[in-house]
């Protein structure tokens, strides 16, 4: 969320941002959407490593990252991560 929000502030010139977080026993979902300038997510942007870093971190955790954007259309980023046995939420529930 931090990198997506940073990109919104730095690049998008958005006047509205929506942040959604949902957690179930199987999945953690994080969505960040803005009404900013948008961009072509298939282009490369030399010197800008934020999106690539997000993709790598999500992939290393076994999740997926979806980026929807187009010039003039805003941006929507959705990260989906599987819940793992022994995660913080599972441990918290066991200790209650």
Image: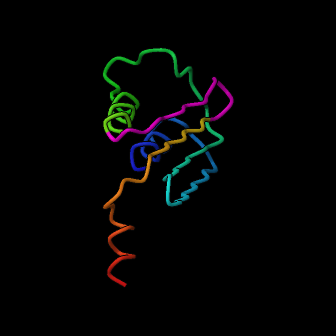
* Residue at 39% across, 43% down: 3
Return the residue nearer the eye: 36 or 85.
85
Q: Which of 77/49 is in front?
A: 77
How far across and down, in percent of the image, does residue 95 sit? 32, 81
Magenta region includes residue 26: no
**Residue in view at x 67 percent, y 27 percent:** 72
What residue is shown at x 63% (from left), y 48% (from top)?
15
| Vertical position of residue 2 compared to residue 57: above or below | below
Which quarter of the figure is the C terminus placed in? bottom left
Question: What sort of colour scheme is used for the picture?
Answer: rainbow
Q: How many marks?
A: 0
- Tell which of 56 and 63 is nearer to you: 63
Q: Is residue 12 left or right of residue 82?
A: right
State the residue lying farthest toward the right. Answer: 73
Residue at 40% from the left image edge and 50% from the top image edge? 2
- In front of the other: 92 or 10: 92
- For the record, the magenta segment spans 61-74
Task: Residue at the far bottom: name it.
Answer: 96
Q: Position of residue 7 (x, y in %)?
A: 45, 39
Q: Give the image quarter of residue 40.
A: top right
Q: Find residue 37 and report its image quarter.
A: top right
Coordinates of residue 50 in the picture (x, y in percent):
36, 33
Depicted 13 relative to depicted 69: above or below: below
């Amino acid at each position: 969320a931090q990198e997506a929000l940073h990109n919104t502030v730095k690049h998008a010139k958005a006047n509205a941002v929506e942040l959604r977080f949902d957690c179930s026993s199987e999945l953690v979902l994080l969505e960040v959407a803005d009404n900013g300038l948008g961009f072509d997510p298939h282009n490369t942007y030399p010197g800008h490593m934020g999106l690539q870093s997000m993709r790598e971190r999500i992939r290393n955790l076994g999740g997926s990252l979806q980026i929807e954007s187009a010039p003039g259309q805003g941006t929507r980023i959705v990260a989906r991560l599987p819940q793992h046995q022994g995660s913080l939420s599972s441990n918290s529930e066991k200790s209650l």
